[in-house]
Image (cartoon, grey):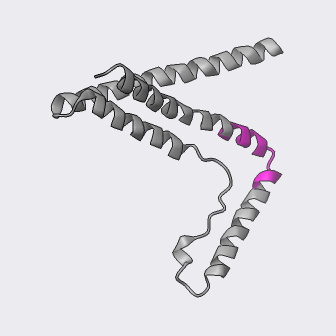
Amino acid sequence: MKKDRLIRMMKRALVQLLGIIICLAVSFGIAYLIHYFSDTSLRRVMVYEGFLIIMAGVLLSPRGNRSIINVNALDQPNAAQIAYRDLEVNRMEQEIERQDTSYYKNFFSSMKAGANNLTFIVTGTIMQIIAMNYLS
């Protein structure tokens, strides 16, 4: 049992590493093309691209309940009623999902999908490190 779990974790780590390598290769290719066709240094392009990739990873990472107030109704006189209605619909949807037997299966699969965004964050960080330390 523990051996199977270890093998699954190693496979996930290998897939994550492969995703990071592919993302790095594509990012370096894009950075080199931008450097080649413009008057910008490769270091500067990689720094900017690294920041963009990190931001994309951070912005793609949030998971969880939708408990945001509807901002379209803020200037209306019944904004509180609209916000209450939206929260009630959200609560009812969550109750329906919890009654479904596949709810917990979907919950854990959404947690697995969140780990893929780590690829972007690690790729952007590696690009920053390479650009700052190894390129002049």
In the rendered image, the quadrant that contains the N terminus is top right
- Span shown in magenta: 97-110
Q: Residue 5 colored magenta? A: no
Q: Image quarter for residue 50?
A: top left
Q: Is residue 5 above or below residue 128?
A: above
Q: Is residue 124 left or right of residue 27?
A: right
Kindly indicate the quadrant of the structure image that contains residue 13.
top right
How far across and down, in percent of the image, does residue 116 sit?
56, 33
**Looking at the picture, how far across and down is residue 122, in whole percent?**
51, 29
At which x and y percent is residue 73? 55, 77
Q: Residue at x 63, y 77 (%)?
A: 82
Q: Residue at x 66, y 70 (%)?
A: 86
**Identity of the residue drawn at 36% across and 26% down:** 131
Quadrant the C terminus occupies: top left
Number of numbered discs? 0
Q: Residue at x 57, y 43 (%)?
A: 61
Q: Main SS type for the magenta part?
A: helix
Q: Position of residue 98 (x, y in %)?
A: 80, 52
Residue extending furthest toward the top = 3
Q: In front: 87, or 46?
A: 46
Q: Is residue 68 above or below residue 18?
A: below
**Which residue is more in the foreground, 33 or 49?**
49
Tell me if 49 is positioned left or right of 124 in this view. Answer: left
109 on left or right of 37? right
Would you place residue 127 above or below residue 100 in this image?
A: above
